[in-house]
Image (cartoon, grey):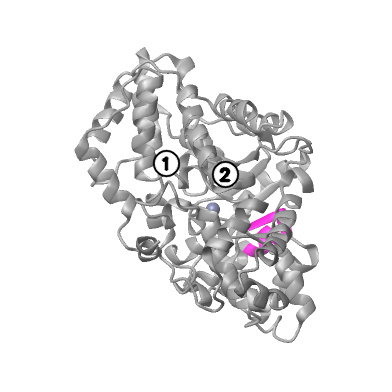
Amino acid sequence: MEELKEASAIVPPERAEIDYNTFVKAAQEVGLVCLHRHFEGTFTLSHLRELSQEISRDLDVDLKLKDETWDSISKIMAGTGERDLPSFIARLSTRWLRLMLIKGVMDGADGHEIIKKYADHFLQLADDEGIKTIEFLLSPFAFCKEGDLGIDYIDDLPKNAPEEEKEIIEQWKLRSAEIDQDNIPTLFSLCGAVNDLIKEKYRVINEDFSDDKRMGVGFRLCLRREKKAEEFLTTEIEETAKRFGGDRSELISQIVELYKAEVIQGVDIAGVESSKDLFLYNKLFTRLDQYGIPCTVHVAEMPESEAEKAYKNLETAIVNSRALRLGHAVRLFDDNAEINALLLQVLKSRTLIECNVTSNGWTGCAPNDLAEHPIIRALRRDHSLFKNNPDRIKELWDCIVICSDDPVIFTSEKESKAFLPLIDEHYKILCVVVPTVYPEKLEAIQRGDENALKEIFTELKTKGEQATLANIK
Ligand SMILES: [Zn+2]
């Protein structure tokens, strides 16, 4: 555990001494719920290496990369030390999953089988953690024909790109005519492949589970604001839709079909928030609403210096988008008159906040000291709306669901297999807030009373399960 703490971005607070082992045991016994975890934010370098070997063997293709490429991937995934959202996103595995997919398809593999292998690995990790219900975020446009795999508009590579990556992408462009098109996933077929895997191995999130003890799984289609591939879903882009070969109405119809077929649970808007104001998606929100498609948004995941922009986005999310849940929402807790009015509205409507505090330090939206995170401070009543209002603190707690976002960011490479990212997130948060939110249980927990912890986990789990889109739509 020692290396792990060193590797972590956030110093575990010492507000309440809770025995970690008792904590883990209680959490695993009750089971956890995660409503906000990115597919592309979960694979560490060693997961990628394992996948490359496993897929090469099982699908009889060559997915292996050169040692110098792995070294370079390792450096890129470790990050530059910058704390902002673009640097954070650059550390995720999206680019490398895509590279291996392209390499496999050029080698004759069916891309859908590769995607299923990725999904299998992702879900196995969650299952090993003791998660009982997961609604994860998949950005299919990173891996499909209509998105970043489109031959003409694949991302421009950064200067430090490994030579082998450049070569593979160059080949991909040159050999486009000879590639079997059926092997390249489309938005529709890719989501279908992931859904098939879920049905084969797990319980679908909205199905009755009285006799089925397997992990319940669903996913949202996650759109990335900063990507050209998804630009056509905003209002100003009729032009770019044509330029990038995307037909907006056709793709929106496909999203509707995917939802109706119960392949996706809903739609989420993520990515670099400063790159596109949320109101540009108003037309999309209207369309989603028209078809009853649940929507969640990443919002106010911005540093204090961009508070005004974050407030505008929060207003759009809360007033216009009818978002059923808000991801991050850090700036909603800035505690000033302007933003407190919106926070009261969130409490009143019981809109869930997917709280991902570990990521917020790395994206520069919150201090590295977890105890100083705006949401944790509010839960500790260090906020004018909650200071002398125990009922309201209960309301706030009812709106918070603890999630893990991108475990790759806070999981050390060495411990990636054995470490339980979501449990660690719960542990850190509860260590700080337990004395305020569960004062009556604190003494029992400190005594090592597992039952007191299990009661807390049961409450968290019930709340999380009720908040799945399958339940609230
Ligand atoms: Zn996220």
Q: Quadrant of residue 258?
A: top right
Q: Where is residue 280 drawn, in percent x and y?
A: 60, 52
State the extent of the magenta-drawn residues as a range: 314-326
Residue 197's spot in the image, x, y percent? 58, 27
* Residue situated in front as seen by the camera: 380 or 384: 380
Q: Nearer the viewer, residue 222 or 8?
A: 8
Q: Using the image, determine if residue 424 lies above or below residue 237.
A: below
Q: Mark number for residue 94?
A: 1
Q: Is residue 322 magenta?
A: yes
Amino acid at dot 1? Thr
Query: Seen in the image, is 398 located left or right of residue 105?
Result: right
SS at badge 2: strand
Left or right, residue 326 beside residue 58 = right
Which residue occupies the foreground of this view, 185 or 362? 362
Ligand 1 within 8 angstroms of badge 2 C-beta = yes
Q: Secondary structure at mark 1?
A: helix
